[in-house]
Amino acid sequence: MSTTSFIELKTPPVPYYWESGRSDFRVGDRHPNRRNLGLFDLLIVAGGALHIGENGAEWELRGGDTLLLLPDGEHYAVKPCEEDTVFYWIHFEHAHWQQGTHSAKADGTLPASLPFSAPYTLRLPKRSALREPEEALSLVRRMPGLTAGDSFWEDQRLFLKILSLLDAGSPAPSASPTARLAELTAAYIRQHYREELTNESLAEALHFHSTHIVRCMKARYGVTPVHYLLEYRLDRGKRLLLTTDWPVERIADEVGFRYAPYFSTCFKRRVGLSPAMFRKQYWNG
């Protein structure tokens, strides 16, 4: 089991793009030394080799590699470039973040965030090798050349797309059978959440043993299918409380709860407020 360093960005708000550019280093050139830049600095290497360090850790970055430098860190050249090197950099800002590590499973996957979670936590690897480097490079190449009129919204869109390619919590296409079955199960639950779903009915619908489905869901999302279903129903209920004036009884029925009191109990346990108080808090705010 391997351990990977991640930077976790709590949203909302989403990270804010500042600027980006391309750097062409010749043999003997060095990355500049900086301390407490105040912004994240995302490096995406297109070719060559970049030797860089931060706070005592050192990396050699090759084509398709990325490195996320911290706003409060000190980064510096480990040694001059030994070959011509091209890389792109993106400066962005985000207030609520922390650095940590996650242990990868034996099949190389990480537990993903629930896709309907709000707030959502972006998990960006400290250093990564992109699965499809050309996709990220094609996006970052477009950013510095935008005209002033188009720049703000298009820059933000392209930037967030790049982050989505790096986000370990996003439901990216997965190669492992474990992740594929978990994602298939999650999709089935989201489509049929109003129905009475059990481990047995999922097994019958998906043609896998219920124990195997539970194991895959826990590996991919960190929860059982029943817990996933409950969280999804509560999330849908929360949205209906904010966007409709329906009574709690109708909302409970709409999201798959047979008994409104049980919906209210589960909702209060998760949110800390009864459905009525939750709605009142936002409608009166």
Image: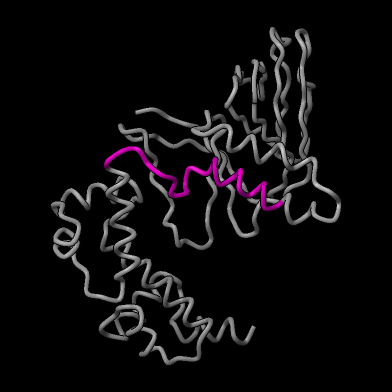
- Identify the residue shown where x is 36% and y is 72%: 233
- Identify the residue shown where x is 60% and y is 44%: 163
Task: Determine if the magenta segment contains residue 95.
Answer: no
Q: Where is residue 72, by image quadrant?
A: top right
In the image, residue 95 sits, relative to residue 285, either above or below, namely: above
The quadrant the C terminus occupies is bottom right
Q: Position of residue 111 (x, y in %)?
A: 38, 45
Tell me which segment is drawn in magenta: 156-177
- Identify the residue shown where x is 14% and y is 62%: 200
Single out the residue that lies furthest toward the right: 148
Image-based side of 246 in relation to 74, left or right: left
Task: Determine if the magenta segment contains residue 160.
Answer: yes
Q: Position of residue 249 (x, y in %)?
A: 36, 90
- Identify the residue shown where x is 47% and y is 61%: 117
The tally of labels here is 0
In the image, residue 78 sits, relative to residue 126, either above or below, namely: above
Colour convention of the picture: one colour
Q: Position of residue 42 (x, y in %)?
A: 67, 35
Image-based side of 26 in relation to 47, left or right: right
Q: Where is residue 32, by image quadrant?
A: top right
Q: Where is residue 106, by image quadrant?
A: top left
The residue nearer to you, when weighing 160 against 6, is 160
Q: Position of residue 20 (x, y in %)?
A: 76, 38
The quadrant the N terminus occupies is top left
The residue nearer to you, when weighing 252 against 193, is 193
